[in-house]
Amino acid sequence: MSATAETSTRHDWSLAEVRALFEQPFNDLLFQAQSVHRQHFDPNRVQVSTLLSIKTGACPEDCKYCPQSGHYNTGLDKEKLMEVQKVLEAAAEAKAIGSTRFCMGAAWKHPSAKDMPYVLEMVKGVKKLGLETCMTLGRLDQEQTQALAEAGLDYYNHNLDTSPEFYGNIITTRTYGERLQTLAYVREAGMKICSGGILGMGESVDDRAGLLIQLANLPEHPESVPINMLVKVKGTPLAEEMDVDPFDFIRTLAVARIMMPKSHVRLSAGREQMNEQMQALAFMAGANSIFYGEKLLTTANPQADKDMALFKRLGIKPEEREEHADEVHQAAIEQALVEQRDSRLFYNAASA
Ligand code: SF4
């Protein structure tokens, strides 16, 4: 099958077609994904986002992978909603180290009427700093979605997590239909969608295909598709799950790239467990977005300078946000690179 034939944006993927993509020899699949990628993106640019947990722990949902669920004892401290000023300070730091998007996550079933005004202030403040804004706050109703859009929220993250068939094994407190409804409200309000899933929860290849079919067959593809590798946290029901074969993980990224050719495919949670070779393969497969520089909600994320050192070795540059590609931002990136060159870390990264 030629790469050109695969690049049109489609919304009618069947399971048989997606299975066939997964079953290709690894090299053929990667070649096809990279060919599709090059038709829509600069292959040597990767978008960087920073993710901040604005309210941690005690979530009423029972997502079996999540250390923030109040259903499991993971030793995580329960926190209140962060102060607006603290969030803005973190956003300014994220901008200084080269992030173009600031994602704010709260462990809620849905935002309460009491919390909404603070959340809206955060969106407005982060936006003023010249960053793209993204939030993940759980289920939204139509009114809340509209208010977030009016405050200037660019992206809303709401993951589908897995296939509809496997979903009930992972979450029982929120339905798949509710997730799709929130995504529909986000679109109606004119915001961009960030939605993806998690690998390594005991799902089959057909479940991975099923997740990607749900995402790709939405009326519009999500602009951002995070593909997470399960981070196994003690105390959660999935703490003892089997590791995903790294090549199967890369295959899923490649299939996502082919099915959603214009979306940013994000190498997301679990990157800490991936060595540099695997991350390089992920970029080859079409991943072109990472979280960077801060803690990824509650699990460790590789250090920002280590990321920059890897980018440098691979000849990758952070994607600029065109309308905000100012000199200050560029200077911050250059400065980070100089500091790495001067530090042992840069040289040690090769063997880390
Ligand atoms: S994944 Fe989100 S909704 Fe699910 S338990 Fe964790 S914080 Fe709550």
Image: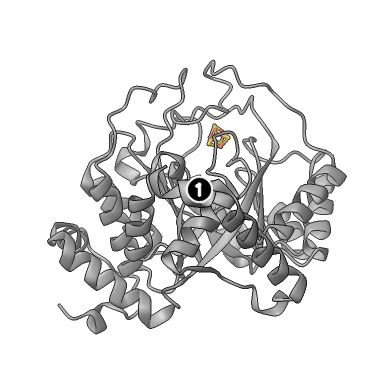
**Image quadrant for the N terminus?**
bottom left
Q: Is residue 139 left or right of residue 82?
A: left
Judging by the rendered image, the residue that carries numbered circle 1 is 179
User: Secondary structure beneath disc 1?
Assistant: helix
User: Is residue 173 toward the left or the right of residue 34 in the image?
Assistant: right
Displayed-image quarter of ligand 1: top right
Please say if 216 is above or below 3. Answer: above
Q: Is residue 259 above or below residue 199?
A: below
Q: Quadrant of the C terminus?
A: top left
Q: Quadrant of residue 149?
A: bottom right
Question: Residue at position x 36%, y 66% from top?
Answer: 286
Nearest the camera: 87 or 124?
87
- Decide: is 346 above or below 67: below
Instruction: Provide residue 196's location: percent of width, then percent of height.
Output: 44, 52
Q: Is residue 247 visible?
A: yes
Locate residue 334, reporting x and y percent.
65, 67
CA neighbours of label 1 inside 10 A, class few (<14), some (14 to 19), many (20+): some
| On screen, residue 230 above or below 307 | above
Q: Position of residue 268 (x, y in %)?
A: 47, 49
Give 35 or 219, whichever is nearer the viewer. Answer: 35
Q: Residue at x 30, y 42 (%)?
A: 165
Residue 158 seen from this side:
no
Residue 79 x %, y %:
73, 27
